[in-house]
Amino acid sequence: MRIDIITVLPEMLTGFVGTSILARAQKKGLAEIHIHNLRDYTTDKHRRVDDYPFGGFAGMVMQCQPIDDCISHLKAERHYDAIIFTTPDGRQFDQPMANSFSLMQNVIILCGHYKGIDYRIREHLITHEVSIGDYVLTGGELAAAVMTDAIVRLIPGVLSDEQSALSDSFQDNLLAAPVYTRPADYKGWRVPDILLSGHEAKIKEWELTQSLERTRRLRPDLLAERHK
Ligand code: 6GU
């Protein structure tokens, strides 16, 4: 899978995509992540990518030209399955969305900034508008990082069997059961006996009971979702 991220703050993302699981996914050839500096596409001699809004509103608006040129440049090279715009008024990102994006071949993520982008870009070029939650970030870079991480870790081969995405919280609308490692007794804080018993079937049953109990207590909304 290939992800192209368009941003005015490339330095916010280069370290992130070159670290840990995302770095390994790229080294293994399972993911390609390219960061594009929007300023490289402006025809403005001062490298401006924003301007004052029509109508006399406050704030600055990202202009059509650099965004259109950058996206056109990418589209001339390959077909894109999704052109995502990060924006607080988008649809809220969740695990099913991560799953469906992870099945795609080529995806563009355009990071929003300032008061917004010229609405004509959203009307004519964007296929998906996505938010990561009901709070306001200064820019879409962190949202792009969150989405990229959630998407790339789902690509087959990116995680090892032990880290398998199948046991994640949310994958089946259940929170994960608690996990423990050695020592079995730390300062009198004991690991549940069942986990030391070696009874595989009983351990599985314990895990499901814990998942259900924690979901009922902490996220009852997820259980309601499960029964739909
Ligand atoms: Cl995608 N962008 C911004 N600026 N703020 C957000 C967001 C996105 N998602 C939640 N808050």
Image (cartoon, helix red, strand yellow):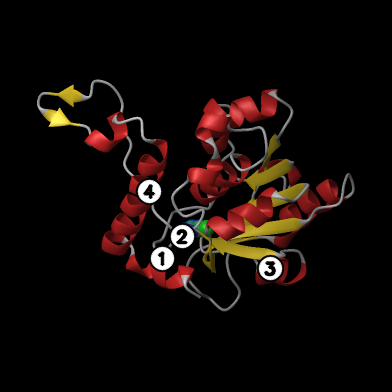
* Image location (x, y in percent) of residue 119: 66, 71
* Image location (x, y in percent) of residue 90: 55, 67
Residue at figure coordinates x 82%, y 47% from the top left: 74
CA gap, disc 1 to disc 3? Answer: 31 Å
User: Circle 1 is placed at which residue position?
Assistant: 222
Give the residue type that dot 3 points to.
Arg
Crowding at dot 1, Cα within 10 Å, few <14 / some 14-19 / many 20+, comes out as some
Circle on res. 146: none
Q: Secondary structure at mark 3?
A: helix
Q: Of callouts 2 and 3, which one flags the residue occurring earlier in the amino acid sequence?
A: 3
CA gap, disc 3 to disc 4? Answer: 48 Å
Crowding at dot 2, Cα within 10 Å, few <14 / some 14-19 / many 20+, comes out as many
Report the number of numbered marks.
4
Q: Secondary structure at mark 4?
A: helix
Write down the quadrant of residue 121 in the picture: bottom right
Work out whether residue 111 can be spotted.
Answer: no
Q: Decide: marks 4, 2 in contact (CB < 8 A)?
A: no
Q: Of callouts 4 and 2, which one flags the residue occurring earlier in the amino acid sequence?
A: 2
Crowding at dot 3, Cα within 10 Å, few <14 / some 14-19 / many 20+, comes out as some
Q: Decide: marks 1, 2 in contact (CB < 8 A)?
A: yes
Q: Of callouts 1 and 3, which one flags the residue occurring earlier in the amino acid sequence?
A: 3
Q: Secondary structure at mark 2?
A: loop
Give the residue type that dot 1 points to.
Leu
Q: Mark 1 against mark 3, which lies toward the viewer?
A: 1
User: Circle 4 is placed at which residue position?
Assistant: 205
User: Circle 3 is placed at which residue position?
Assistant: 122
CA gap, disc 2 to disc 3? Answer: 31 Å
* Image location (x, y in percent) of residue 129: 62, 65
User: Circle 2 is placed at which residue position?
Assistant: 173
Residue at figure coordinates x 36%, y 35% from the top left: 199
